[in-house]
């Protein structure tokens, strides 16, 4: 059987940077997991924003 430990994977929230600056209502957020050992710094991924209807940069928050 596989070990069930705490592991290095943590859940992070990605928030759109362009949407925040535009001042529009709502917020585009995605939830994903990352390996904190391999990626100690904050994630920055290009993802689709359904409110702005285009691909934008989403950064990890908190």
Image (spheres, rainbow, N blue to C red):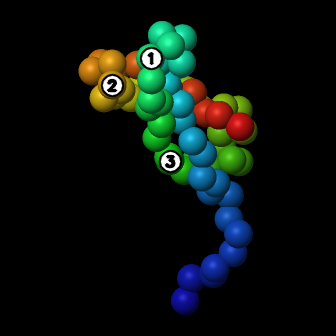
Q: Position of residue 61 (x, y in %)?
A: 65, 34
Taking the image as shown, residue 27 lies to the left or right of residue 4, namely left
Residue corresponding to mark 1: 24
Q: First in sequence: mark 2 or mark 1? A: 1
Element on which disc 2 rests: loop
Q: First in sequence: mark 2 or mark 3? A: 3
Residue corresponding to mark 2: 51
Crowding at dot 2, Cα within 10 Å, few <14 / some 14-19 / many 20+, comes out as few
Question: Whole-Å distance between the Cαs marked 1 and 3?
Answer: 24 Å
The residue under the point 50% across, 47% down is 32
Query: In the displayed structure, would residue 8 be above or below residue 5?
Result: above
Is 24 or 6 nearer to us in this picture? Answer: 24
Tell whether label 1 touches label 2 (CB within 8 Å): yes
The residue under the point 65% across, 39% down is 39
Is 12 or 2 nearer to us in this picture? Answer: 12
Residue corresponding to mark 3: 32
Element on which disc 3 rests: strand
Question: Whole-Å distance between the Cαs marked 2 and 1?
Answer: 9 Å
Please name which of the two marks, 1 or 3, marks the residue nearer to the observer: 1
Query: In the displayed structure, would residue 17 be above or below residue 31?
Result: above
Q: Position of residue 46 (x, y in %)?
A: 42, 24
Picture quadrant of residue 9: bottom right
Count how many numbered circles sit on residues in the image. 3
């Amino acid at each position: 059987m596989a070990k069930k430990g705490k592991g290095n994977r943590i859940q992070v929230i990605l928030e759109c940077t362009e949407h925040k600056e535009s001042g529009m209502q709502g917020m585009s957020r995605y939830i994903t997991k990352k390996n904190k050992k391999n990626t100690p710094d904050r994630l920055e991924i290009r993802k689709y924003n359904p409110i702005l209807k285009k691909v934008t940069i989403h950064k990890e928050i908190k």
